[in-house]
Amino acid sequence: MYRNKLAALAVFFALTVLSVKVAYSQFSMSNPYSRYGIGSMYGVASQTGSAMGGVGYALARNNDINILNPASYSAIDTQSFVFNIGFDLSWNRLQTSNDKSKSFLASVQNISFAFPVMRRLKVGLSLMPVSDVDYKATDTVFAVPVYTKKYTGEGNVDKFTAGIAYEILSNERNHLSVGFNADYHFGTITRKTAMDFYATVKDTNNKWQDTAGFFNNQTVNRIKVSSFMFDIGVQYFYRTTDGDMLGLGLSFTPSVKLNTETEQKFYTYYNKSGVNDTVNTISDKNIDGHIKMPMRIGGGVSFERPGRLFAEADITYTKWSQFEFADPQNMKDNVVFNAGAEYIPYRNSTNYFSKLAYRFGINYDNGYIYLADKRIDKFGISFGTALPIKKLGTKVNLGFECGRMGTTQNNLIRNNYYKLSISITAKDRWFVQRRYK
């Protein structure tokens, strides 16, 4: 029976990986700030933690997979297998001082599962997105001759995580565990920069005439990422004489260089009736390089009254000034604050809604992107619930977050976003031989 379950799991996991790629290619829409860094970064908190403002350093449960702190895997029951798949739907309203637009993004947030190897040793595996790149920008320069610079980008970086957690101490009052995640990053980012030249006179329709099209040129950088990162974590929980739990969690990710291979092409073209015809390929080469990812350290404290109340506050510091990519970028070290709570009115009630877990939280990021003397900060509020389906051994997590990123000051862009999260978590007995009469 163990082999049958494992085989079924492997097939399901492979099919789900394919669905991730389909989701990315079909639904991604423009995001102007994905032009910087390696794109718009995804959060790594579980759906449970996301509904509580993105907390997770001091969160550990036997029916949830918390990738944010690998030490949390130790909370998985010694004879249980936990599987989770989550989806995000995001609506964005982009606004400048003069214009407005809308965009939509749908993606698989994570696919993960965890299971025990020994009583004190647990394993967690996951596949999730790291960043998404999808932007278009145009800048017209009224010089002699007049020309337009066009910037476009697309692609994404994902990661596969294999982690372990070991329970160092566990008794009636104290629980101490450590964890380790090895992350394999992979993906492709395509960045294009084009210069379209125009004459200094306009036609009868008040549009610039393309009389110097042979000067048009474009640089295409197709950057393939393939490398490893890792992070470590520790969690400590203390049970008071009243039965309440006090928790402390820490996580550290060192600065690492991700290996890249860039296919770079530079060519001139002529634009006629909106169609680009290549005139001459000036350069076509492959370049080995790297992306230097910054060091990150985070910690959190939690309080839990089992079956009734949970609250946590986290802080994360990332040294984005260490970041290195193909182009120089002005990144600032940033700090993120997360806080949230979960409340269950009455777990033993016969009323279904009184037994549900209600979650809410807030988060603030002071911003690592620095443009026009402004940090692109972010603020959001979130709430959600968990709907248990006992007969199937599953629960459905629902979460909603709304907030804003950026500002309209200094000709910048503000993004008012709304995100709906849905995940399904299944927990089943594992390594147990069933008997039938």
Image (cartoon, helix red, strand yellow):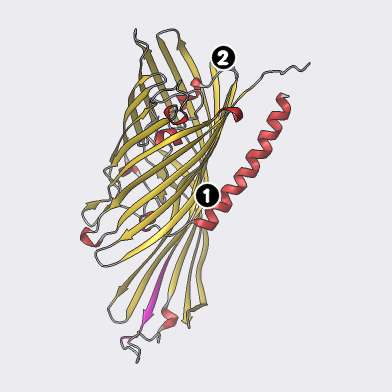
The front one of 72 and 351 is 351
- Which residues are drawn in magenta? 193-200
Label 2 sits on residue: 119
At which x and y percent is residue 230? 47, 33
Specify whether residue 318 is in view: no
Label 1 sits on residue: 187
Relative height, residue 180 to residue 211 (above, below): above
Distance from Cα at disc 2 to Cα at disc 1: 36 Å
The residue lying furthest to the bottom in this view is: 204
- Whether residue 186 is in magenta: the answer is no
> Amino acid type of disc 1?
Gly
Which numbered tag is attached to residue 293?
none
- Whether residue 198 is in magenta: the answer is yes
Q: Judge depth for marks 2 and 1 and give the one in front.
A: 2
Q: Are marks 2 and 1 in contact (CB under 8 Å)?
A: no
Say which residue appears at 39% left-offset and 26% top-offset.
344
- How busy is the neighbourhood of tag 2: few (under 14 within 10 Å), some, or many (20 plus)? few
> Amino acid type of disc 2?
Arg
Relative height, residue 432 to residue 36 (above, below): above
The front one of 254 and 280 is 254
Specify whether residue 13 is in view: yes
SS of the residue under disc 2: loop
- How busy is the neighbourhood of tag 1: few (under 14 within 10 Å), some, or many (20 plus)? some
The residue lying furthest to the front in this view is: 350
At which x and y percent is residue 112? 55, 35
SS of the residue under disc 1: strand
The front one of 218 and 6 is 6
Q: Is residue 410 left or right of residue 351?
A: left
The image quadrant that residue 299 belongs to is top left
Say which residue appears at 38% left-offset and 86% top-offset.
209
